[in-house]
């Protein structure tokens, strides 16, 4: 009876959460909430959550990390050859314009991973201020102010810098990520062999003849974690993270996520897998970075493979940890015969419920 009551309680909590989420993501209420949050931050004269010293240099472009809101990151991508610039997920128009001014560049494109206001909330104001700007988002994602909808495999060009679009639909219905294709990767034959099977002969990537160097992962792959499953199910999320783009990219690819969540995520991961040395070491380093407000991103994808249980939910140690720490709130019990997808779903629910803090 206790288990039944607990399960029903969690069911109704999730239903209420889904209603609140729908109001936030798909009605003007979300943008109003976002605008009010920006006003409060400006009135409170709150400084940025992170202090960034210099841009991250890739082979064809510089990436300026631009802290926004309480823990968001936007990115200013500046092509080396042409100085053409694009913003990834600039939710605060004023901060975005200030960053572009400091870099002395003209922004021609906004690359939007998904429609949540904390990623797309600056679109309309930027579109009004930058008359010729192109707003790019996933097809059917309902990105505010969108002028160009993109789908899997398309190439977006920022000057001579190429970014490949990859569909990653589980945090939102039509979430996309943008993969920077860097010229230095061409010389690496091992790298070329590692991903050669990913692209069909007809793929637009052939036009660039370049290989992956970095990824703007939005709210799909987060530091030590993954985004909530707002619109997709665990099957889709598991496939994307463990069989899709994130498993086919080389480990040396830089990951630029949408949030500064590293410490919070690794706190959970150390609770789940306390004997995991790589997670413990990464957490210690991240805490040290945050004491001086330094960003913990970008990180190499190979570090995520070592420390992010959503990328190795098929391992026996994760299964054993979930079985040992599961509770009635999971609603569906996991066992030694549960699939990797079931384990993945259980870990996501355990994190959603913040079981490590109870």
Image (cartoon, grey):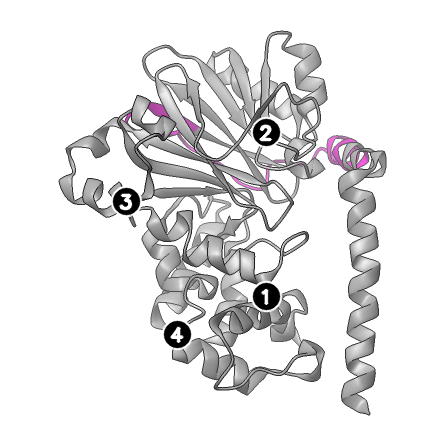
The mark lying in front, picked from 3 and 1, is 3
Element marked by disc 4: loop
Name which residue lies at 46% across and 84% down: 320
Element marked by disc 3: helix
The reply, left or right, for residue 85 in relation to residue 252 is right
Image coords of residue 340 (percent x, y): 47, 72
Query: Quadrant of the rendered structure where residue 84 is?
Result: top left
Label located before the other in sequence (4 or 3): 3
- The answer to whether 8 is drawn above or below residue 169 in the figure is below
The mark lying in front, picked from 2 and 3, is 3
The disc label shown at residue 315, or none:
4
Q: Which residue is mark 2?
A: 137
Element marked by disc 2: strand
The mark lying in front, picked from 4 and 3, is 3
The reply, left or right, for residue 340 in relation to residue 315 is right
Image coords of residue 114 (percent x, y): 62, 37
Label located before the other in sequence (3 or 1): 3
Label located before the other in sequence (2 or 4): 2
Question: Marks 4/3: CA distance?
Answer: 25 Å
Q: Which residue is mark 1?
A: 348
Answer whether labels 1 and 2 touch (C-beta < 8 Å).
Answer: no
- The answer to whether 12 is drawn above or below residue 240 in the figure is below
Answer whether labels 3 and 1 touch (C-beta < 8 Å).
Answer: no
Image coords of residue 284 (percent x, y): 42, 63
Label located before the other in sequence (1 or 4): 4
Image coords of residue 179 (percent x, y): 41, 35
Q: Which residue is mark 3?
A: 197
- The magenta stretch spans which residues? 36-63
Question: Marks 2/3: CA distance?
Answer: 26 Å
The mark lying in front, picked from 1 and 2, is 2
């Amino acid at each position: 009876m206790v288990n039944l009551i607990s399960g029903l309680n969690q069911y109704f909590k999730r239903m209420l959460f889904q209603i609140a989420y729908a109001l936030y993501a798909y009605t003007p209420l979300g943008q109003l909430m976002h605008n009010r949050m920006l006003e409060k931050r400006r009135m409170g004269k709150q400084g940025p959550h992170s202090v960034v010293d210099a841009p991250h240099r890739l082979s064809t472009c510089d990436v300026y990390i631009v802290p926004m809101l309480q823990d968001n990151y936007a990115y200013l991508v500046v092509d080396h050859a042409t100085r053409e610039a694009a913003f990834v997920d600039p939710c605060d128009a004023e901060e975005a314009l200030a960053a572009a001014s400091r870099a002395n560049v003209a922004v021609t494109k906004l690359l939007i991973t998904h429609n949540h206001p904390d990623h797309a909330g600056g679109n309309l104001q930027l579109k009004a201020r930058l008359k010729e700007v192109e707003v790019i988002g996933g097809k059917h994602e309902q990105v505010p102010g969108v002028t160009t909808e993109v789908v899997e495999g398309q190439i977006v060009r920022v000057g001579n810098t190429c970014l490949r679009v990859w569909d990653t639909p589980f945090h939102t219905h039509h979430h996309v990520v943008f993969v920077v294709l860097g010229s230095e990767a061409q010389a690496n034959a091992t790298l070329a062999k590692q991903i050669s099977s990913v692209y069909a002969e007809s793929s637009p990537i052939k036009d660039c003849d370049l290989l992956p160097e970095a990824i703007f992962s939005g709210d799909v792959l987060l530091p030590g974690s993954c985004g909530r499953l707002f619109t997709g199910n665990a099957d889709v999320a598991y496939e994307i993270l463990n069989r899709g783009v994130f498993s086919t990219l080389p480990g040396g690819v830089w990951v630029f996520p949408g949030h500064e969540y590293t410490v919070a995520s690794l706190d959970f991961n150390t609770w789940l897998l306390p004997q995991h040395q790589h997670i413990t070491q990464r957490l210690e380093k991240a805490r040290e970075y945050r004491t001086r407000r330094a960003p913990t991103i970008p990180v190499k994808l190979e570090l995520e493979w070592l420390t992010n249980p959503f990328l190795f939910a098929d391992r026996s140690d994760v299964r054993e940890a979930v079985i040992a720490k599961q509770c009635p709130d999971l609603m569906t019990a996991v066992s030694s015969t549960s699939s990797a997808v079931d384990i993945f779903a259980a870990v996501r629910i355990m994190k959603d419920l913040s079981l490590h803090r109870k």
